[in-house]
Image (cartoon, rainbow, N blue to C red):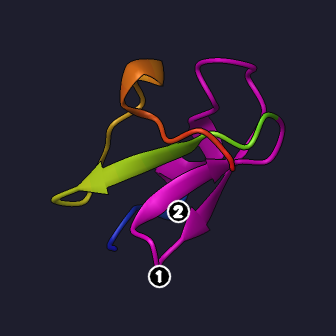
Amino acid sequence: MNLDPKLLDLIVCPACHAGLAVDDAANELTCTGCGLAYPVRDDIPVLLVDEARRPS
C-alpha cells in the first residue's frame, strides 16, 4: 500500500471519527475506535461504512 502520510493524518473513520491505522498485510485501514476495517483499492481508501468489514 502506498498512502501519503499526510493523508493518513487527515482522514478518520466515517462511523465514529476515530483515527485509522494501516494494516499492510490485509490492505486495509482499521479504525482505532470501533474496529471497522476499510479496504484500500489501487492505493485509494474506500471510506464507506457499507464497504467496511465488521470486527469479528
* 11 over 20 or under it: above or below: above
Residue flagged by tag 2: what amino acid is it?
Answer: Pro
**Cα distance in 3D space between marks 2 and 1:** 18 Å
How would you rate the neighbour count of disc 1 (Cα within 10 Å): few for under 14, some for 14-19, many for 20 or more?
Answer: few
Question: Quick one: quadrant of the N terminus?
Answer: bottom left
- Local secondary structure at mark 2: helix
Question: Which mark is nearer the camera, 2 or 1?
Answer: 1
Residue flagged by tag 1: what amino acid is it?
Answer: Ala
Q: Residue at x 47, y 44 (%)?
A: 38
Say the numbered circle drawn on residue 5: 2
**Quarter location, residue 16:** top right
**Quarter location, residue 18:** top right
- Local secondary structure at mark 1: loop
* 50 over 27 or under it: above or below: above
Q: Is residue 24 magenta?
A: yes
* 45 over 41 or under it: above or below: above
Report the residue marked by disc 1.
25
* Image-based side of 26 in relation to 17, left or right: left
In this view, the residue in front, 52 or 16, is: 52
Q: Residue at x 46, y 35 (%)?
A: 52
Q: Is residue 37 magenta?
A: no
Q: Residue at x 53, y 62 (%)?
A: 5
* Image-based side of 33 in relation to 39, left or right: right
In this view, the residue in front, 27 or 43, is: 27
